[in-house]
């Protein structure tokens, strides 16, 4: 690598979105604007000279004292060259999901209509299962790794990101709530050999 | 996707900006032809302006009649240089005025020379402003322009702005000043809000086109959609996919119902698929559709039947361009199958879909020419595109995770496949993490028609991941083999050798983007000395210094601009350029306002101008 950076002290002159003098743990760390961006018009008084390099969104978010975690990766301003609008779209989606809950459709074989649940509100599988039992007035029992939900009349399954139907309980909870797209309570008679096309 | 608004206004082709890529000439050109000619026989001027009589009146009238048909602005510039008479005639007949840099010429000068303009296109900030590399209040204000236009061009019909700062007051003045106003297109603009849109909607009674593309629109809590006139309207195109606030859906539906000419409708991501359905059945004549979220935003009412989306798409027999899919639920993807065969333009660049989902759609898209997509489709998805889309002209692959440490699901495998399957490719933008020279070389040979080649290897300074070599040979092959290449963006580990190739072979290159590349001043010298057509050069974080900068003195007046940030420039070096070239505006920008004015130049932005230094600079900008 022929380009030496040390002599130029680029860190000191680095373009950043933070205020001058803010502490950075890593060189070239940039405060990525947290996902949720409001485009409400900022009052003129709020945008002062020192904030020239901050977008309105940033100022708003700072004022609201966002708890969103700073990025863990070190990044350079404006690199890769993707417009902030596009960058924010996917970050916004992630944060919106975190803030507002993850609603998934849940169906039960034989029931006349579907319901929707916010899986975000549960801390783990047992809470989810109890809630499902309550909603549909059924019993699914408890998950066991070897045999799933043996003995119960109903088996909870879910469709994951890849479109596959999986048994609820196999993967860690966090992975489940991000990959679960919809839930289906199957009759155990149908649930044999889960992993085949349903 | 809209027809590539980003390159719509690039100078990759000579023509004045068409409103459709590759499509027929825009409204203004046709108005060019239908307007009254002054008549070959020279009898009585039908124009409003007073013309002093002079001996060559007849000749000049003939000339004007001929010049009406000249649309290319390069040709027009050439014609205007022939002699005074031609200069005058050309100035009188130019109805579409394109200002590539709003600071290169003043509104006053422009409106004085060209007195019969119907269509104005103005570009403001340089492209790197999109990536937070410029202060937000840098400039490019529309205000002085609209003020001058309001006085000079009462018959103005069209305004196209890119990267300008536009205020609500500007929009209000625009709406009041031009009774025949028809088209407003704002690309990458900011500074206005829904209140400005409301004024435009209510006062521009002849409005046909209102397109807001990748612009930042403030939410003033104004229901702008309701401000369109109650009577039937002429609206042909309405694009608001970048507007991040709710629109009144009932008002929108009524608007669509009373707009029989509506051909292009691009909804924002706050419109649900259910609402999309209702609009689609009202407007089966649409040719361009932005679908909004393409998902259900609220909890489904119990037992409610979902609308038959497939039938709505089946009924839209004229659809050729599809975009949106902002929060796509893949369940709904099959709804678009009926229109795929007719699509020439598909924008999936906000749709986080996997390879299988993409394949399920692309297998129907044999006529696709423009395709924007996310790298979530992986190399596998690109292979499917290569297999099916033989007519592909333009491909853009954006990253779902635009960071240097991203996994990067696409690689040289996808690029190679595309090069083999899509031989007619003209334009490519490809974000990836792994690339090889071999794949780039293959593309240079398989796709000889390439005009735009932009490769972004997101991790900085990454070499060919199989050989460990710099990416010099790949880019070298591109400039050598692609004889029509006018736009190039390089990335990865690059030595001066790469720039040597560009200087040697890139004789038609007009736009060059460089980041984290090169070893020494020689790199920049090769380019400045070797590329006679170079107009826009943007460089960041590369080791080019004052000596390299001076090597371009012979050429800077022929360029639109030069941008160099985080390079090795000093104030002294920049000042020398400013002294040597009085018609160049040399702007030096810094982030930290408190820092001492040292010798190091963080950001240099320089451009030719007839006006000298501007007077609207913020504190962070200094003009040398």
Image (cartoon, rainbow, N blue to C red):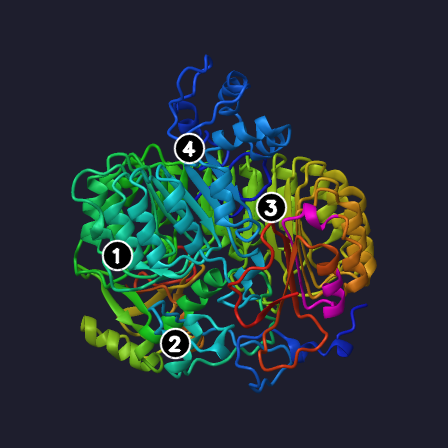
Q: Position of residue B267 (x, y in %)?
A: 33, 50
Q: Which residue is mark 1?
A: B247
- Quadrant assignment, res B594: bottom right
Asked if residue B435 lies left or right of residue B382, the reply is right
Q: Which residue is mark 2?
A: A60
Q: Chain of mark 4?
A: B
| Nearer the camera: disc 4 or disc 3 | 4
Asked if residue B71 lies left or right of residue B254, the reply is right
Q: Position of residue A113 (x, y in %)?
A: 19, 60
Neighbour tally class for label 2: few under 14, some 14-19, many 20 plus, Cα within 10 Å? many
| Nearer the camera: disc 4 or disc 1 | 4
- The magenta-colored residue range is B555-576
| Nearer the camera: disc 3 or disc 1 | 1
What is the tally of numbered marks visible in this picture? 4
Location of the C terminus of chain B (image quadrant): bottom right
Please report whichever mark, 4 or 3, sits nearer to the chain's N-terminal start.
4
| Nearer the camera: disc 1 or disc 2 | 2
């Amino acid at each position: 690598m022929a380009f030496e950076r040390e002599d130029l002290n680029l860190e000191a002159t680095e373009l950043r979105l933070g205020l001058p003098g803010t502490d950075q743990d890593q060189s070239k760390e940039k405060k990525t604007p947290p996902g949720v961006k409001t485009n409400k018009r900022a009052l003129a008084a709020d945008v002062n000279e020192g904030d020239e390099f901050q977008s309105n969104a940033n100022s708003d978010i700072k004022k609201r004292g966002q708890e969103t975690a700073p990025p863990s990766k070190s990044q350079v301003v404006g690199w890769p060259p993707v417009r902030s609008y596009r960058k924010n779209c996917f970050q916004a989606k992630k944060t919106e999901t975190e803030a507002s809950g993850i609603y998934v459709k849940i169906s039960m074989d034989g029931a006349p209509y579907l319901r929707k649940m916010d899986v975000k509100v549960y801390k783990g599988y047992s809470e989810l299962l109890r809630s499902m039992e309550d909603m549909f007035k059924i019993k699914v029992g408890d998950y066991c790794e070897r045999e799933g939900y043996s003995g119960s009349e109903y088996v909870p399954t879910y469709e994951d990101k890849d479109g596959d139907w999986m048994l609820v309980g196999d993967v860690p909870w966090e992975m489940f709530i991000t990959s679960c797209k919809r839930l289906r309570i199957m009759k155990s008679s149908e649930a044999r050999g889960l992993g085949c096309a349903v | 996707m809209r027809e590539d608004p980003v390159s719509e206004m690039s100078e990759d082709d000579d023509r004045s900006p068409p409103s459709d890529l590759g499509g027929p000439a825009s409204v203004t050109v046709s108005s060019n032809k239908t307007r009254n000619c002054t008549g070959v026989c020279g009898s009585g001027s039908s124009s409003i302006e007073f013309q002093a009589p002079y001996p060559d009146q007849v000749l000049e009238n003939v000339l004007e009649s001929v010049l009406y048909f000249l649309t290319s602005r390069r040709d027009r510039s050439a014609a205007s240089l022939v002699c005074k008479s031609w200069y005058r005639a050309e100035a009188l007949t130019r109805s579409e005025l394109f200002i590539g840099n709003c600071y290169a010429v003043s509104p006053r000068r422009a409106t004085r020379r060209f007195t019969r303009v119907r269509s104005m296109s103005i570009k403001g900030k340089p492209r790197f402003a999109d990536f937070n590399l410029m202060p937000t209040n840098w400039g490019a204000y529309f205000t002085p322009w609209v003020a001058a236009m309001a006085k000079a061009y009462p018959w103005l019909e069209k305004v196209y702005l890119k990267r300008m700062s536009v205020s609500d007051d500007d929009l209000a003045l625009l709406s009041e000043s031009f009774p025949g106003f028809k088209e407003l297109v704002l690309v990458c603009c900011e500074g206005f809000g829904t209140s400005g849109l409301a004024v435009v909607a209510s006062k521009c009674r002849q409005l046909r086109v209102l397109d807001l593309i990748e612009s930042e629109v403030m939410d003033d809590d104004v229901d702008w959609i309701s401000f369109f006139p109650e009577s039937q309207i002429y609206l042909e195109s309405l694009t608001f996919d970048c507007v991040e606030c709710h629109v009144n859906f009932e008002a929108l539906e009524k608007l669509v119902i009373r707009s029989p000419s509506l051909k292009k409708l691009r909804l924002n991501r706050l419109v649900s698929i259910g609402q999309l359905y209702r609009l689609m059945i009202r407007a089966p004549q649409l040719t361009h559709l932005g679908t909004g979220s393409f998902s259900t935003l609220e909890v489904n009412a119990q037992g409610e039947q979902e609308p038959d989306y497939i039938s709505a798409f089946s009924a839209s027999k004229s659809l050729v361009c599809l975009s949106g899919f902002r929060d796509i639920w893949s369940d709904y993807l099959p709804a678009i199958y009926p229109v795929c065969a007719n699509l020439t333009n598909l924008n999936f660049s906000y749709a986080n879909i996997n390879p299988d989902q993409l394949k399920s759609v692309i297998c129907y898209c044999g006529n696709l020419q423009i395709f924007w997509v996310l790298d979530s489709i992986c190399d596998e998805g690109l292979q499917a595109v290569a297999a099916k889309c033989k007519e592909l002209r333009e491909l853009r692959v954006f990253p779902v995770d635009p960071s240097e440490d991203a996994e990067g699901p696409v690689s040289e495998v996808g690029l190679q496949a595309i090069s083999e399957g899509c031989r007619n490719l003209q334009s490519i933008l490809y974000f990836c993490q792994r690339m090889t020279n071999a794949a780039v070389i293959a593309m240079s040979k398989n796709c000889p028609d390439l005009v735009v080649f932009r490769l972004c290897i997101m991790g900085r300074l990454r070499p060919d991941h199989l050989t460990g070599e710099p990416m010099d040979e790949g880019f070298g092959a591109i400039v050598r083999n692609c004889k029509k290449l006018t736009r190039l963006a390089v990335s990865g580990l690059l030595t001066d050798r790469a720039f040597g190739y560009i200087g040697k072979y890139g004789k038609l290159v007009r736009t060059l983007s460089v980041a984290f590349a090169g070893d020494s001043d020689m790199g920049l010298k090769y380019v400045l000395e070797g590329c006679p057509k170079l107009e826009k050069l943007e460089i960041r974080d590369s080791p080019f210094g004052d000596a390299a900068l001076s090597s371009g003195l012979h050429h800077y007046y022929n360029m639109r601009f030069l941008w160099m940030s985080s390079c090795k420039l000093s104030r002294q070096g920049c000042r020398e350029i400013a002294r040597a070239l009085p018609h160049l505006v040399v702007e030096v920008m810094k982030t930290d306002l408190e820092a001492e004015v040292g010798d190091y130049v963080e950001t240099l932005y320089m451009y030719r101008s007839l006006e000298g230094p501007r007077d609207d600079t913020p504190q962070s900008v200094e003009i040398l």
